Amino acid sequence: MSKASMVVDKDFRTAEIDKRIYGSFIEHLGRAVYNGIYEPGHPSADEDGFRKDVIELVKELGVPIVRYPGGNFVSNFFWEDSVGPKENRKPRLDLAWRTLETNEFGIDEFQKWCKKTDSQVMMAVNLGTRSTKDALNLLEYCNLDTDTTYAKMRREGGHKEPYNIKTWCMGNEMDGPWQVGHKPAAEYGLLAAETAKAMKIMDDSLEFVLCGSSNIMMPTFPEWERITLEEAYDYVNYVSLHQYYGNDAGDTADFLASTLDLEEFIHTVICTIDYVKAKKRSDKQINLSFDEWNVWYHTMKSDNEKMAREPWDRHPHLLEDHYNFEDALLVGLILITFLKHADRVRIACLAQLVNVIAPIMTEDDGPAWRQTIYYPFLQASKYGRGYALQCPLTGAVHDTSKHSDVSDVDATAVWNEEKKEVTVFAVNRSLTETVDFSCDLRSFGNVKVVKHTEMAGYNVNAENSAASDTAVAPKDSSDHSLDGGRLDVHFKPLSWNVIVCSAE
């Protein structure tokens, strides 16, 4: 049995956690919208055609913000086609995913859906095939109550009150050659700066997310961040990061070491931002919006073949990865990493929310169900509110095929001062070793364990299904002891662990 130890002190605070790190993403892609969140005629559909079973699962997750409508989709999105009477809406070809967009569901419907799920909208504007002018028209439609064209259009469509959307993405993955309307860094940076500047004149309460690199392997990373920020630093509040992980090689140990690359990605972007800040002699701090992240690889090959073979289909089954146990472990590790960097990672969007690389799946005319990755996200969202703590961690390490000095256990803790609760989140990456984990909680005074759960003992390929969405799920555990503020736990091999303690 190997050992690991961690010191948790309530006064060693990294930052107060922005609840938006538990955000998500809905794109007009596959069955995310149609037969996902929206399915008129479904037994659970409400008066607006929204699936109430999906709404309940989203509310259970506690998702505070949802990015919309893309993603690659947004770079050829004509927002005007998605509002007004449905019988007058224009169908369009979606060039990103080679499907047919009917526009039956649009901005008005999404705003209404977000209110029902207790979420806010994070709106993306099309800076691929459109301009600053179109972004201003969209902002007027969404946020203004003036006697002008687009504000009147919203009211005449039956939506009297402005939507008051505060967080806006300046396009999507504009560094990517696959993006419709892809631009060189300097050109995009100038367009984003001018668009944000103009939108701020119209509504000075807005926050803006600048497109960062689409992933850490982009040949332009991190020069893209430097060049675009030199143009747009004064006008934006966040730089976006996107990253997906996969295990095509079937190498579980190395797959679970992927968060070492994530650490490097975050560190490099922070350094680049702060270099530009220093160069500009600025007092303004720009933070990170990790607005696309997840495991994504299971269906990639078959999806590409389907889009080539059957273009212009309506809401086809695309990117419907079925997640297994090791995917849930990696999701837990990613969430731990975000919490460790809560001072700069202020927004994060699990991509996506329903059906498309998602924690929630639906069956057409059938039930909605929870994938394996639903559970670590649920527990982090529920218990990871309050202050992220700096937690010195020591313990055994191992090497994998592509990574060195990988800690057997990765862990962190969160202090919820209002509830007087401290929660430890931990993953044992070791394939074979139980880890004797010791946690020093003495700074919290008299503590007691109120909840201890573990996801452990499953085959790495074990999945959930519509028939059983608790086949792979956290189970209550009593395998701990607490004496004098010292918590001792045995972390089983390949396990996600959550321990909630009350502090008097």
Image: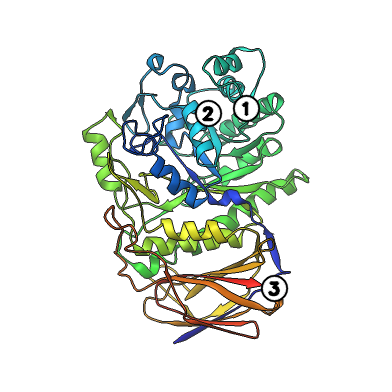
Q: On the picture, is 485 further left or further right than 481?
A: right
86 relative to 407, above or below? above
Instruction: Give percent across and percent down for residue 74.
Output: 46, 31
Question: Is disc 3 surrounded by few (<14), some (14 to 19) or many (20+) residues within 10 Å?
Answer: few
Q: What residue type is labelled 3?
A: Glu
Residue 144, disc: none
Q: Which amino acid does label 1 sit on?
A: Thr
Give the mark, 2 or 3, whose residue is nearer the N terminus: 2
N-term-proximal mark, 1 vs 2: 2
Q: Nearer the viewer, residue 68 or 422?
A: 422
Q: What element carries label 1?
A: helix
Q: In which quarter of the image is residue 355?
A: top left
Report the Cα–Cα distance between label 1 and label 3.
51 Å
Could you say which disc has been placed on residue 127 in the image?
2
Question: Residue 351, can we see it?
Answer: no
Residue at 29%, 58% (x, y): give it.
468
Is residue 182 shown to the viewer in this render?
yes
Position of 439 with respect to 445 (left or right) is left
Q: Which residue is drawn at 69% across and 46% down?
A: 276
Task: Report which residue position mark 3 lands on.
Answer: 504
Residue drawn at 45 percent across, 22 percent down: 82
| Residue corresponding to mark 1 | 195
The image position of residue 347, as x and y in percent, is 58, 48
Q: 121 or 176: which is nearer to us? A: 121
